[in-house]
Amino acid sequence: MTRVLLVEDHEEIWDFLSRRLKRRGYDVVVATDGQQAVDKARAERPDIVLLDMNLPILDGWTAAGLIKGSPEGARTPIIALTAHAMSGDKEKALQAGCDDYHAKPVDFAKLLLQIEALAGPGSAAA
């Protein structure tokens, strides 16, 4: 089963996403700030990280760099989730270490395709 680290500080969003991902067969671990994201990425060894970029304590750009800069997180794909949809924001997320970018509001069908593309086909429960 694919383990997803979902990093989101808005309860409505992480509740919605975690319930839908679990129904699709994913094992979901939730972090609500950037420091928790870094700590849980190291401890939980997720297969993929869904990372809000506007977070308390450490922002998503800093957290992405720390996750990718660690031996256990260097190869972990990260999808930036952000309400920042301005020109240059996707490039900024990719430069921070994210592998893909998803603007909010979340299009769940599109997000699933992005997860499968990065975590591998059939990445949910077998």
Image (cartoon, rainbow, N blue to C red):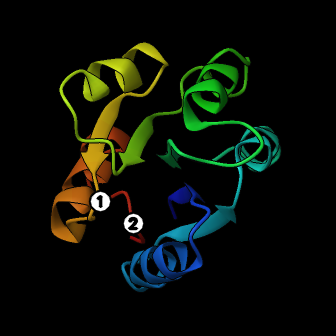
* Residue drawn at x 52%, y 46% as measured from the top left: 49
- Which quadrant of the view contains residue 108? bottom left
* Amino acid beneath label 1: Gly
Check the image and report above or below for 26 versus 34.
below
Q: Quick one: label 1, few (<14), some, or many (20+) residues within 10 Å? A: few
Circles 2 and 1: CB atoms closer than 8 Å: yes
Pointer 1: what residue?
Answer: 122
* Residue drawn at x 48%, y 85% as measured from the top left: 19
**Residue 7 percent coordinates (x, y):** 59, 55
- Which quadrant of the view contains residue 11? bottom right
Q: In which quarter of the image is the C terminus?
A: bottom left
- Which quadrant of the view contains residue 20? bottom left
Q: What element carries label 2?
A: loop
**Residue 112 percent coordinates (x, y):** 26, 61
* Amino acid beneath label 2: Ala
Along the viewing direction, whichever of 99 and 104 lies nearer the viewer: 104
**Residue 98 percent coordinates (x, y):** 43, 27
**Residue 84 percent coordinates (x, y):** 32, 42
In 3D space, how far apart are the residues under numbered discs 2 and 1 (Cα atoms)?
6 Å
Q: Is residue 84 left or right of residue 34?
A: left
Pointer 2: what residue?
Answer: 124
Along the viewing direction, whichever of 95 and 84 lies nearer the viewer: 84
